[in-house]
Amino acid sequence: MFDILVYLYETYYRPDACPEPEALARKLSAVGFDDIEISEALDWLNGLTEMAGTINPALESSGTRFYVSQEVDTLGSAAVGFIQFLELAGLLTACQREIVIERALALDESPVTLGKLKIIVLMLLWSQGKEPDALMFDDLFGADEDEDAEPRLLH
């Protein structure tokens, strides 16, 4: 599913440039993606669109987000830390944070890898027609700690 999400991000500059779901499913199938993965990706994107439509940005909160134990268990400490980092750096609003958490919890995996969480953040921004700024872009596309990569230095 995540390969499809990355393909959509790379292929369609804006979400409104994507064809209708049936046509998109045919295109993805023609490119070589599996029908089950296509269905999962389109369902996940539909959930993203629905979630984004239900949140009112005028009700932005500046309070602290407390995670229940089920969320921490499902997301994992690396994902929770990364979400907090993005929010504290001003790169995600509280509403965007809630969408990221909801879409991560919609996955059937625990804990959510940092790489997949980064794709979720990227897809949220893409769906809202926003480009990640330079700092966020580096964090989204830099080396993941869950891969066999050298850790990045802060200086």
Image (tube, rainbow, N blue to C red):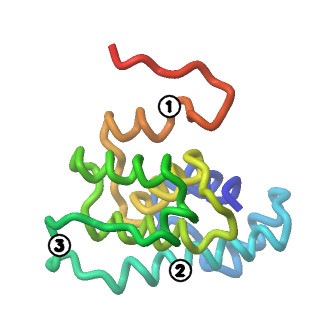
- The image position of residue 24, as x and y in percent, is 68, 71
**Residue holding disc 1:** 142
- Residue in the picture at 35% in, 64% down: 97
Report helix, strand or loop for mark 2. helix
Report helix, strand or loop for mark 1. loop
- Residue in the picture at 60% in, 56% down: 112
**Residue holding disc 2:** 47
Mark 2 or 3: in front is 3
C-alpha span from label 2 to label 1: 27 Å
Report helix, strand or loop for mark 3. loop
- Number of numbered discs present? 3
Left or right of 58 on screen, residue 137: right
Depth check, front residue: 38 or 59: 59
- The image position of residue 113, as x and y in percent, is 61, 50
Depth check, front residue: 91 or 146: 146
Are the residues flagged by discs 1 and 3 in contact, CB closer than 8 Å? Answer: no
C-alpha span from label 1 to label 3: 29 Å
Name the amino acid, label 2: Gly
Q: Of the numbered discs in the image, which one, if any, rests on residue 60? A: 3
